[in-house]
Amino acid sequence: MPNTCAAPPESLPLDLLDDARAVPSDLGMMQSVLDAIPSAVIILDSERQVFFANRAAARLAGKLGHTDVQGMRVGEMVACSMMS
């Protein structure tokens, strides 16, 4: 696991993130609305992991889609450890 300096080492397993993501019945509509926003939108969970990221946020991270960044911390997503 990458050292993000500011984030605690605990992370939620991806299966728990998937369970939480399945709760909203109109997640598809939320996905469509937030993907239409040209700016990066990132929603974090209580562990500061990416719960949701729109397409612009995924592109910012150099990823193909929003599911590629789910479960990451923002620092991991944008590779801040490589900037120093």
Image (cartoon, rainbow, N blue to C red):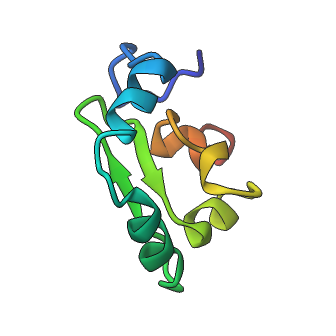
User: Is residue 4 among what the camera can see?
Assistant: yes
Residue 25 to residue 14: above or below: below
> Residue sitting at 40 percent across and 43 percent down?
51
Instruction: Pick whichever, 22 or 40, lies toward us.
Output: 22
Instruction: Pick whichever, 81 or 54, lies toward us.
Output: 54
Looking at the image, residue 53 sits to the left or right of residue 6; the answer is right
Q: Quadrant of the N terminus?
A: top right
Where residue 81 appears, as percent x and y from the top left, is 61, 37
Residue 10 to residue 20: above or below: above
Instruction: Pick whichever, 40 or 52, lies toward us.
Output: 52
Instruction: Pick whichever, 15 or 22, lies toward us.
Output: 22
Where residue 70 appears, as percent x and y from the top left, is 53, 40
> Residue sitting at 22 percent across and 33 percent down?
46
User: Is residue 80 among what the camera can see?
Assistant: no
Seen as rendered, the residue at the extreme front is 25
Where residue 9 appears, as percent x and y from the top left, is 40, 14
Residue 2 to residue 27: above or below: above
Seen as rendered, the residue at the extreme left is 46
Residue 23 occupies quadrant: top left
Residue 36 to residue 67: above or below: below
Residue 43 occupies quadrant: bottom left
Where residue 80 appears, as percent x and y from the top left, is 58, 45
> Residue sitting at 38 percent across and 68 percent down?
30
